[in-house]
Image (cartoon, grey):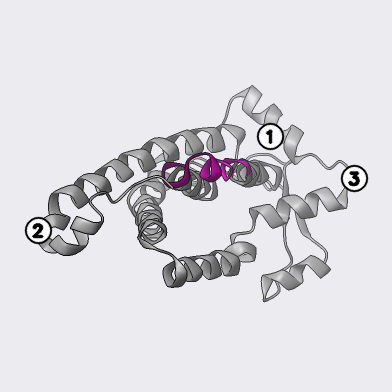
């Protein structure tokens, strides 16, 4: 079980405050399916209309998310096996959007709210790391490296999404802290690797293109 402080912080953010609009806001922030169409549209627009800088950012972002999801997050979830709050505390609440498609229509439906259901015997959990938190902080880190202070503004929605994962009952507070910090460090390492690969191999494979763009990662 997480520490007493971890549990207290979780119950503070997950508590029922009698504010349905707040629960719905947390549920919307926490729902990847709700935001997926907007992310896909933004990616397509960047791929279509963006220049080298924007497209390089998009490729670095997609590579980083894919590498972290398949090579780090999913294996760690299985290895660590930490239970989610909903499987550990009867006082926990699961807060989610209604099961309708497209997910945007869920705004007009009541939330799905369920109490925690501690499992006996305990099941292998998937609480650590938080994929939502890791991916959002990956987005923010890539944008910051490519666009400096303008990209750094994305850390605010990333932090809100991370907090929503606690408020909706999916993760412990320590999960999102570890996931955010780990994601920043891993993403910076991957970006350094991509830049090194580009400098070393692009002049050999695409010399004319590399001459116009000697650096994969530049600021804008």
Mark linked to residue 174: none
Q: Quadrant of the N terminus?
A: top right
Residues at marks 2 and 3 touching, judged by CB atoms closer than 8 Å? no
Of residue 167 and residue 90, the one placed in the foreground of this image is 167
Is residue 60 shown left or right of residue 92?
left
Q: Position of residue 41 (x, y in %)?
A: 54, 70
Q: Is residue 148 magenta?
A: yes
Of residue 179 and residue 84, the one placed in the foreground of this image is 179
Residue at x 50%, y 38% (from the top left corner)? 180
Mark 2 vs mark 1, CA separation in Å: 53 Å
Q: Magenta region's main secondary structure?
A: helix
Residues at marks 1 and 3 touching, judged by CB atoms closer than 8 Å? no
Which residue is labeled 1 in the image?
10
Helix, strand or loop at disc 2? helix
Which residue is labeled 2 in the image?
204
Residue at x 59%, y 66% (from the top left corner)? 38
Is residue 128 shown left or right of residue 58?
right
Give neighbour class at mark 3: few <14, some 14-19, many 20+ (Cα, 10 Å).
Answer: few
Q: State which region is magenta.
A: 144-156
Could you tell which of marks 2 and 3 lies nearer the N-terminus?
Answer: 3
Which residue is labeled 3 in the image?
18
Q: Is residue 94 above or below residue 163?
A: below
Q: Position of residue 125 (x, y in %)?
A: 51, 46
Helix, strand or loop at disc 1? helix
Give neighbour class at mark 1: few <14, some 14-19, many 20+ (Cα, 10 Å).
Answer: many
- Determine which quarter of the picture holds residue 39: bottom right
Q: Position of residue 144 (x, y in %)?
A: 47, 42
């Amino acid at each position: 079980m997480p520490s007493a402080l971890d549990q207290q912080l979780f119950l503070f953010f997950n508590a029922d405050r009698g504010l349905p609009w707040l629960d719905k806001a947390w549920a919307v922030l926490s729902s990847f399916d709700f935001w997926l169409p907007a992310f896909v549209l933004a990616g397509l627009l960047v791929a279509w209309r963006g220049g080298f800088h924007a497209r390089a950012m998009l490729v670095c972002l997609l590579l980083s998310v894919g590498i972290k999801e398949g090579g780090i997050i999913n294996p760690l979830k299985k290895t660590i096996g930490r239970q989610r709050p909903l499987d550990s505390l009867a006082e926990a609440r699961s807060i989610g959007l209604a099961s309708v498609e497209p997910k945007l229509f869920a705004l007009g439906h009541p939330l799905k709210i369920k109490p925690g259901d501690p499992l006996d015997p305990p099941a292998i959990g998937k609480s650590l790391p938080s994929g939502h938190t890791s991916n959002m902080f990956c987005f923010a880190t890539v944008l910051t490296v490519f666009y400096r202070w303008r990209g750094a503004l994305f850390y605010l929605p990333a932090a809100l999404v991370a907090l929503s994962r606690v408020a909706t009952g999916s993760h412990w507070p320590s999960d999102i802290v570890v996931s955010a910090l780990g994601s920043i460090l891993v993403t910076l390492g991957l970006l350094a690797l991509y830049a090194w690969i580009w400098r070393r191999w692009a002049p050999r494979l695409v010399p004319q293109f590399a001459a116009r763009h000697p650096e994969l990662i530049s600021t804008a």
